[in-house]
Amino acid sequence: MDDELEAGFTAPSGIDLSPITLALNEEHCGQRLDKVVATLVPQFSRSRLQLWFESGHITVDGKPARGKDTAYGDEAIVIAPQAAPEDTAFTPEAIALDIVYEDDDIIVINKPAGLVVHPGAGNWTGTLLNGLLHHCPQLVGVPRAGIVHRLDKDTSGLMVVGKTLAAQTDLVRQLQARTVKREYFALVWGTPRASGTIDSPMGRDAKDRVKMAVSSSPFAKPAITHYERVATGELDRRPVSLVRCRLETGRTHQIRVHMQSLGFSLVGDAVYGKRHLTPVFHRQALQARRLGLVHPGTGEDCEWTVPLADDFAELIAKAGIDEPQDGDVQGEFDDDDDGDVVVEYRA
């Protein structure tokens, strides 16, 4: 779910695709060809060179070469570099963005379910980052195009982006100081207690490194979730509860793992939920509903609120639960009573 990032990451700059000619000499005689090539062009990984060998993009004296062949020391090798998906991942793409608020310093986005935030294995294009670079070209000069935290692909809701390096750095520091206020709605199976706090460190699951888990490992990171049961209903004759969660930390999959650790997995969660119940909904029923922070440019306390995504709203309606309005949920961001004026925005 909400995964906090650190500033300082820069996008890959791409590679020069011009052909490279290598002339071998007697010192290379007797060595494997792939090892010789890897030594002469260290800017490319061995795995990438292996792919080029296999695809015929490395030739010896004009003929496709095999990495396992032996070098004689008098060959002319030509490498025709090929772009990998990640080389062109950080390119602008015309992707529709639901922008809730924008000024010279920040963009607040209502991310739809299904949109990947950041390019990665299997998702090198069509991400929020690609859309941001198209919408605001200046973000090419900001690490991660200004992104400071992530939402899972199938989690909907609010995210903030810094449009300048100064704004992004300020937002990162607010996240690190745990002053950014993040409220989520989740629909879970069962009926948890009226309210509580889950203070359980998290780390990689020891049995499945793709998953996260509550962990006692010395490498586990602190994770704190406050939750409140807002309403109850029924799906497929099973009890469900609409739960409001407020985060102090933003670990990967935090709400999903924390609620599952109490025995109340999210409806539709195919990773942490109950497999025989996942067909009820096509994604985890989770939305970042409200976001509060100090504006990095003006210093004002700001809040943004969005209604539930259409599919989420239809799901809770099916469960016999009305979507709560602002006045229906008490104590939303009242963990501090400093008397500051808060500028509120609603989609």
Image (tube, rainbow, N blue to C red):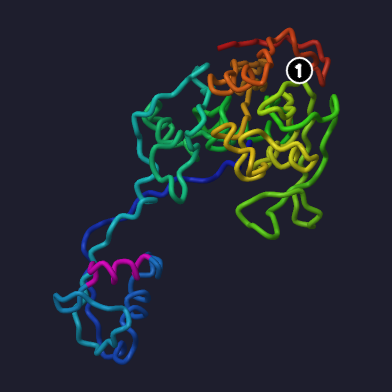
Image-based side of 213 in relation to 75, left or right: right
Q: Residue furthest left?
A: 62
Image-based side of 48 in relation to 248, left or right: left
Q: Is residue 297 visible?
A: no
Residue in the foreground of this view, choosing between 240 and 55: 240
**In the image, what residue type sits under mark 1?**
Glu
The relative height of residue 71 versus residue 245 in the rendered view (above or below) is: below
The reply to whether the magenta stretch includes residue 248 is no
The reply to whether the magenta stretch includes residue 50 is yes
x and y, in percent, of residue 130 in the image:
40, 36
User: In the rendered picture of this protein, how many numbered marks are placed on residues?
Assistant: 1
- Mark 1 surroundings: few (<14), some (14-19) or many (≥20) residues within 10 A: some
x and y, in percent, of residue 70 in the image:
29, 88
x and y, in percent, of residue 223 in the image:
76, 41
Give the residue number, with chain letter if any, for mark 1. 332
Secondary structure predominantly adopted by residues drawn in magenta? helix
Q: Residue at x 84, y 26 (%)?
A: 195
* Image quadrant assignment for residue 123: top left
x and y, in percent, of residue 118 in the image:
49, 40
* Image quadrant assignment for residue 79: bottom left
Q: Which element is circle 1 on? A: loop
**What quarter of the picture does the N terminus occupy?**
top right
The relative height of residue 65 versus residue 198 in the rendered view (above or below) is: below
Image-based side of 225 in relation to 6, left or right: right
Q: Is residue 135 visible?
A: yes
**What quarter of the picture does the C terminus occupy?**
top right
Residue in the foreground of this view, choosing between 93 and 205: 205
Which stretch is magenta? 48-58
Residue in the foreground of this view, choosing between 162 and 120: 120
